[in-house]
Image: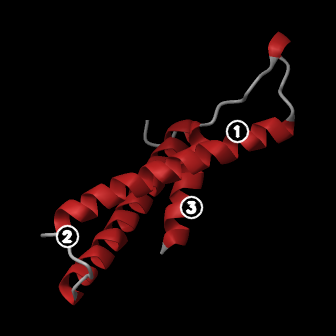
Amino acid sequence: MSHGLLNAVTSTSREGMADFTGSGGQAADPQIQRLIEIETQKARFQALVHNLTGICWEKCIDRPAARLDSRTETCIVNCVERFIDTSNFVVNRLSDVSKRSSSGIGN
């Protein structure tokens, strides 16, 4: 379940990551590029989790309590699973559209 979300974040991060160049237009150290990519992935993952928390809280939590009842727990599980499914669908769809447009198919 969280593996799919991580794949979505990783895929989106790679697609959105431009080549990082240092002074003089030379490519930066590959280790620095990798560090930037990792930090970008972390930030996007944290943003997704924050968004997911807000969406599922509004949808599933009627009133805060000391414990989750079974209905609320089921709602949260379903909410998270639908969010992950939707995120994966969007990432895959955008990837397909990008591949088709870059290969000239459908133009």
| Gap between marks 1 and 2 measured at Cα | 38 Å
Q: Which residue position holds label 1?
A: 36
- Front residue of 55/67: it is 67
Q: Left or right: where does residue 2 sit relative to residue 52?
A: right
Quadrant including the C terminus: top left
Expressed as whole percent of the image width and height from the top left, the position of residue 48 reads 43, 53
Q: What residue is shown at x 43% (from left), y 42% (from top)?
A: 106
Q: Which residue position holds label 3?
A: 7
Q: How many marks?
A: 3
Residue farthest to the top, as pictured: 24
Q: Left or right: where does residue 66 sit relative to residue 27?
A: left
Q: Residues within 10 Å of mark 1 (few under 14, many from 20)?
A: some
Q: Residues within 10 Å of mark 2 (few under 14, many from 20)?
A: few
Q: Secondary structure at mark 3?
A: helix
Residue 103 badge: none
Q: What residue is shown at x 45% (from left), y 45% (from top)?
A: 97
| Gap between marks 3 and 1 measured at Cα | 17 Å
